Amino acid sequence: MASKGIKTFVILMFFMVIVVNGQTRYVDNLFSDVRLRTFNYADTLNLDFYDAANDNLTDKPLLILVNGGGFSAGQRNGGEETNFGKSFAKKCYAVASIDYRLSRKGKSFGCDCPTATKINTYVEAVDDFSKAMHYLATYASDFKTNPEKIILVGSSAGAETVLDSIILKYHYLFKNVVSPKGNIIGAVSFSGTTLNVDYLPEYSAVPMLFFHGEKDDVVPYATAAHRSCKESDDGYLLLDGPLEITKKLRELRVSYELYTDPLGTHQWADLGYRQTDIISQFLYSVVLGNEKIQKQANIAPN
């Protein structure tokens, strides 16, 4: 009887935390006053931290956002990134938008960029991400976040970084990458791929949400060459897109949602940021709520 009473109490406390004044935490905008603070996490690399100033919860789920830009451009505090950070802070998440090395700035990352250089660029980005995650998990109590509930969000190059950090965690090319504190429980990708989805072990697989254009000739939807390079090009490199990644998740019986635009191009690297309703529902129901789902659907630009 005592154990039943404790269980009932825990359930009641859960709903008291989730539902506030008739609105649902992590789905609705419970707060309007969002604060932004900037921290240095490694060398010259910074992160912008968004949270609701008046939220008293001390173990908020943490979204780590990694911007796109082909490893040569993009910024943590661009318009889409800033709007995204504020939007999800209002829903009671903490959001950290991070810097990473733009090692291809002023240089090519196309078909004339050697394959080995491309791969090294991916490894460097994952290493920077891992340092940021380690920093955020180490100081989780100061940030009032739960280091066991970290969700990754990335666009284009940032999405590749996010997916590689999960899928290639034990790949030999990434053996020298920092092993961060904290636990990743989900991921969201806007026009992202990975080097090889076959390396994803069952114990590392997490629920994933994808937005992708099927006509994307920069980052492939299925398995294809990066930037549509030819086999004779110095920068020829096969990548696995979300079609292949979701096949692997389906095989592992891990939840996912894949939204594809049949006519869409790499525009979904930006358009993905604006799908806040789909993202918040997926995070609430599937990532935090453990709902089991494997879904693919078409989507069109708003």
Image: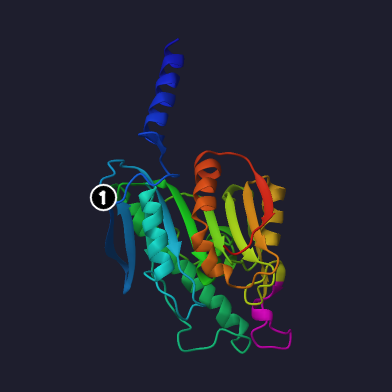
Where does the magenta region start and end?
224-237
- The residue at the point 32 percent across, 53 percent down is 51
Three-letter amino acid code at the position of disc 1: Ala
Residue 235: say if magenta: yes
Tell me the residue at 40%/62% (across/down).
83
Is residue 34 on the magenta stretch?
Answer: no
Question: 189 or 238, which is in the foreground?
Answer: 189
Task: Say few, some or many: other residues with alpha carbon within 10 Å of mark 1 (under 14 / 14 to 19 / 20 or more).
Answer: some
Q: Is residue 138 above or below residue 228?
A: above
Residue plotted at (66% across, 61% down): 260
In the image, 218: left or right of 3? right
Residue at far front of view: 302
Q: Position of residue 22 (x, y in %)?
A: 39, 34
Q: Secondary structure at mark 1?
A: loop
- Residue 163 percent coordinates (x, y): 56, 62
Quadrant holding the C terminus: bottom right
- 215 vs 145: above or below: below
